Image (spheres, coloured by chain):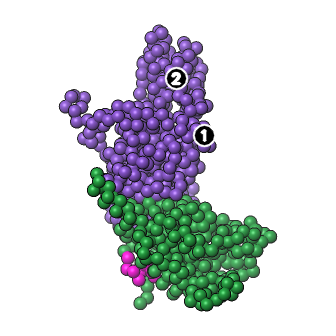
Chain colours: A purple, B green
Amino acid sequence: MDNTEKKQRQVVFWPGNKVVAEAAVAAGCRFFAGYPITPSSEIAHVMSKRLPEMGGKFIQMEDEIAAMGAIIGASLTGQRVMTATSGPGFSLKQENIGFASFIEAPCVIVNVMRGGPSTGLPTALGQADVMQARWGTHGDRPVIALTPSYLDELYNEVIRAFNLAEMLRMPVFLLIDEVLGHLSERVEIPDPSEYELVERPRPTVSPEEYYPYDSSQGDVPPMADYFTGYRWHTTGLNHDKTGFPTTDPVICQAEEERMERKVSGNLELIEKYEEYMTEDAEIGVVAFGTTARAALVAVADARKKGIKAGLLRPVTLWPFPEKPTRRLGQRIKAMIVPEANLGQMIYEVERVAGCNGPVVGVNKIGGVPIYPGEILTRIEEFA
Amino acid sequence: MAVSYTKYLRMYHMPHMWCPGCGIGIIVKAIIRAFDALDWSTDDLAFVSGIGCTSRAPGYLDMNTLHTTHGRALSFATGIKFARPDKHVVVISGDGDATAIGGNHLIHACRRNIDITLVIVNNNIYGMTGGQYSPTTPVGARAATSPWGNIDIPFNVSELVKGAGATYVARGHVGSGVQLERLIRGGLTHKGFSVIEVLSNCHTQYGRRNRIPDAIDLIEHISKSTVSVRQAEKMSPEELKDKYAVGLLHQDTERTEYCDDYNKVIEHAQLER
């Protein structure tokens, strides 16, 4: 990037939750429904101020379930929509998240992860919703979860979350943790000319020829906004291309497989990861979110000690970055997987890495971050 | 003038899935007549439901229709209306859907006074799932889960929503389709949250277990349990026991509507910006 472009960028010192809200506004979000929950509430605070300024809508609903329902309703009218929550609220939203997946309504759900099961540690970090994000709602459906590690990256990932949701007609999760939500750091706000805002596919045919789930239009069928003359029906029941219920096993299977293909067929668009010194690595480290920041320091420290360590950092956690994990796994002696839970992402690493050596977790819960030294100790153990 | 029902119905989805004699048919016809009387474009109408027999109604109507999750229809409808206050949003829900699993959304929609019309089909039972007792099943009544008689005290739905702040509350019944249409039309034109409770018959699940297995007999039984609002005013509490006042029970035209109030928030925020 040259200096003229850099001059256009506003530089701010914001906490992560404010970054989420401001990036959402920049991404064209004009409808937010939420329910108070720590440690995500500041997102709602900023949205309640910013959205009416932009002519948008903010509503505090009666519970987490209602907040999820409200954004789906608004999405059907053509709005770019978001809600924000934390673990317990994410659990409550799951049924309606499945509904959004199945009716293929674009929406962004932010989960600022906290520690522990149940009420757990509301004011402290955790990364324990990895598997809830993947499997939290009943039934099969595709999942996208983005896990940025830095606030600069967070801003861009929020915009990407909206674009992916619209492009693929599906919910997209932004999985951050309490530390990223609450830490403040320098953020360069990209100029709107630096990114594209992608709209959902909309029908080009007449209402008479329109089917809301018409697979002949590709795996992401065009979606008509409510009140534009298309008068379509949708339901959480298994449905055919018309949107009406069906129990035909062939159609049910074909439609659910089409939905899965929206992700499996667009991996190049969705997958994002960063590799650090993996080329000659003998010890691999896989970490995401703020834990990856500690892992990066641990890898650099290991290198200083002459240990060939390397880091793979998924920015898109779901779908899991299988290819880079396998590429790294097949040529290393051991894989270290630090995460702020008792071992969740490690199942994916074990599944895909094809590693001859051990796959070892560094698991710390209780709301404190994993420190670089704790990861370094494990690296040294297997060097 | 005769109403062309087929103008509003997706005839290619007939026959419908309800039992012969089900009261929902009478109610859907009353809703259609109310729409027709107001001459609203079906393009401008969203019809939203949750889960249950009643919640299949939107699928049969040719407008913007949404069949959501159990109990949550009002939250989806709130999102639609709040995003597009210039359009009409109508919700249809059963007694279990609206007052049990959806009870929280119900009272908060009333409190918020958002301009949505809710029709609650109260047939005193969970029909689709096999006849379990609901929050409106009378004490002593038999259901699949109260084989020895129900001990739960039922909600008075209309009083509940009035207490929660609904600004239009009416009760009708399937024995009087003409009155029902008038009450629904009143709710549709009311600016604010309106609820029309409709006493309906589930002879299949409720009637069969409570010695009134015939649709007409059960509709007659329901009709006999109703008194007009005017009659009710003259009756003592003893006389009103097991009776339901039907007609317009409550209307408040003074309270401001939620989306209008939020527009003022937008104006304020844009001035201060």
Residue that appears at 54% across and 68% down: B164
Residue A172 forms part of the magenta stretch? no
Q: For the residue labelled by badge 1, is the local secondary structure a helix, a strand or a loop?
A: loop
Stretch in magenta: B33-40
Residue that appears at 37% across and 37% down: A14
Q: How far from the left and from the top, in percent, is residue A191?
A: 26, 39
Residue B37 forms part of the magenta stretch? yes
Q: Is there CB contact under 8 Å for labels 1 and 2?
A: no
Where is mark 2, residue-wise?
A371
Q: For the residue labelled by badge 2, is the local secondary structure a helix, a strand or a loop?
A: loop
Q: How far from the left and from the top, in percent, is residue B35?
A: 43, 78
Residue B100's image quarter?
bottom right
Disc number placed over residue A141 in the picture, else none? none
Mark 1 or mark 2: whose residue is earlier in sequence? 1
Q: Is residue B211 visible?
A: yes
The quarter of the image holding the N terminus of chain B is bottom left
Query: Horizontally, is B184 left or right of B71 in the view?
Result: left
Q: Residue furthest right?
A: B148
Residue that appears at 57% across and 86% down: B229
* Disc 1 to disc 2, C-alpha distance: 21 Å
Q: Residue furthest top?
A: A306
Chain ID, mark 1: A
Q: How far from the left and from the top, in percent, is residue B90?
A: 46, 70
Where is mark 1, residue-wise?
A120
Kind of residue sitting beneath label 2: Tyr
Q: Is residue A335 visible?
A: no
Compared to residue B168, the image places residue A244 above or below, namely above
Kind of residue sitting beneath label 1: Gly
- Asked if badge 1 and badge 2 are on a common chain, one would say yes
- Main secondary structure found in the magenta portion: helix
Chain ID, mark 2: A
